Image: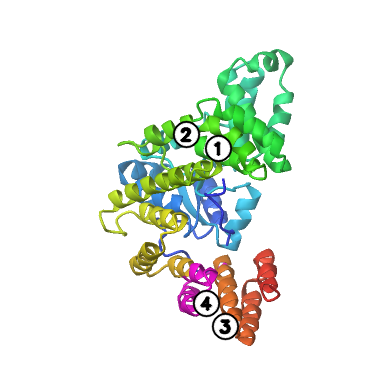
Amino acid sequence: MKHVLAAALLAAVAPAWAAHEGPASLDAALAQGKREHKPVLVDFQAVWCYSCYFMASHVLNGKEWDDLSKKVIFYEADADKPADQAWMKKWTVHFLPTYVAVGPDGEELGRILAERPRETFYPEINGILSGDAKLSKLKADATKGSMAAVAEVLETYNLRYAGTEGMAWFDTLPPMVRNVSDKDKRVAVAKQRLLLLQAKAKKDDAGIRDASTKLLATDIGCDRAYVLDDLLGATESEPAAARADVLRPQKAAYDQFLTTRVFSATPTCADQRSAVLTGADLEAGLQDPTAEQAVLKQGIDSSRAKLHGDLKSDRNAADNLRVYLVRAKAGDELDTVEKQLIAAYPDDYVYNYRHGRRLVEAGKASEGLPFLEAAAKKAYGANTISVATYRVKALLALKRDEEAKKLVAQTVASQGKAFPEQAKKLEETLKS
């Protein structure tokens, strides 16, 4: 899912855009849930997460949200803060946003990955909170032969990115259950998803290609963009003509997906960005640059129509517009939009950082450095390292090596203990 969480997971300041007040930490939220006999709903998000913008402005509000808030202890986990990032690793959270519901006893009740329209999100989360989705109960029902329970358990393992564990559990089912399971379409799809996870974990391109192709032959709804993205990645190293032969059968179904689920008057798939970028990648893989630009133009036009000239009216659409312009290489228009985003969201580091980074990558270090320095004043946690990395690159390009070394030393001293891997990469920037 390269379009969704491609940025590195980036100590003390909460992001300015956080929509809801709550406990000071996830540990405190879990303790409060136990004390008050309430489930805890954890929203893993980040200031750079475009899908999180969508959920904050379109879904986590209104009467349904008010009703849900009375049932749960809600905690916004910031992927850029060390303590919350540790929970992401513990719970195997790879996708933002991810919503994890935990019962008062500490047992996970279920989770939701990625953005959803509100008419989908609330029934899903209320179903999880009802208690019917507890894994232990489902496993017992599966052993007795309930195909619905088998499918739900396998789907739960998929949400947890536990392909090997999920298939190992399936192998423990009585033979009479396993032998008839493939006749159930939902179970068959759930198993294929786990096989895809296993292949991805092993970096087995042949396995990814096989599993993703089989999944794409079924109705997998809004996941079509993500699974096709897996197929695109697994065929990337193949000769262009051979790769196009593999991808060509996907075009008609994907065009229909875009028309009916993404660009319709009432889209059922909330993650437009992944759908558009995967569509552009598909056309590029088919060696059709005109069609590639046409998909991007659809995304650009759709975003502009939603915004009505006001970038603050819908941050998800505004950030999508920025990304489509980047991919379309619309330089002058992109410069204008990025500067408008900086003005629209002055309390965040993210747009100064993105604009400055793009300028540095384009060989315009002197123009990019002031934007990166502005971003540094608002950055926190691991994103401090991301900003510093491009400040260092700009300084080195400008032959200001001593300043670059000093900046690396200061950043490593302040953030290295919490984020050792990112700090090491920052130090390596001096050698590049």
Q: Amino acid at mark 4?
A: Ala
Residue furthest out toward the left: 308
- At numbered mark 1, what does the secondary structure look like: helix, strand or loop? helix
C-alpha separation, residue under disc 4 versus residue under disc 1: 36 Å
Check disc 1 and report the residue beneath it. 228
C-alpha separation, residue under disc 4 versus residue under disc 2: 40 Å
Say which quadrant the C terminus sits in: bottom right
Q: Amino acid at mark 3?
A: Leu
Sequence-wise first label, 4 or 1? 1
Asked whether residue 375 is drawn in magenta, I would say yes
Q: Nearer the viewer, residue 429 or 113?
A: 429
Q: Amino acid at mark 1?
A: Leu
Check disc 4 and report the residue beneath it. 365
Q: Tell me, yes or no, whether the two marked residues, 4 and 1, touch with CB atoms within 8 Å.
A: no
Check disc 3 and report the residue beneath it. 398
Q: Tell me, yes or no, whether the two marked residues, 3 and 4, touch with CB atoms within 8 Å.
A: yes
Q: Which residues lie in the magenta part? A: 356-381
Asked whether residue 163 is in view, the answer is no
C-alpha separation, residue under disc 3 versus residue under disc 4: 7 Å
- At numbered mark 3, what does the secondary structure look like: helix, strand or loop? loop
Check disc 2 and report the residue beneath it. 254
Q: Position of residue 233 (x, y in %)?
A: 62, 44
Asked whether residue 36 is drawn in magenta, I would say no
Q: How is this picture coloured?
A: rainbow
C-alpha separation, residue under disc 2 versus residue under disc 1: 9 Å
Sequence-wise first label, 3 or 4? 4
Q: Position of residue 22 (x, y in %)?
A: 44, 56
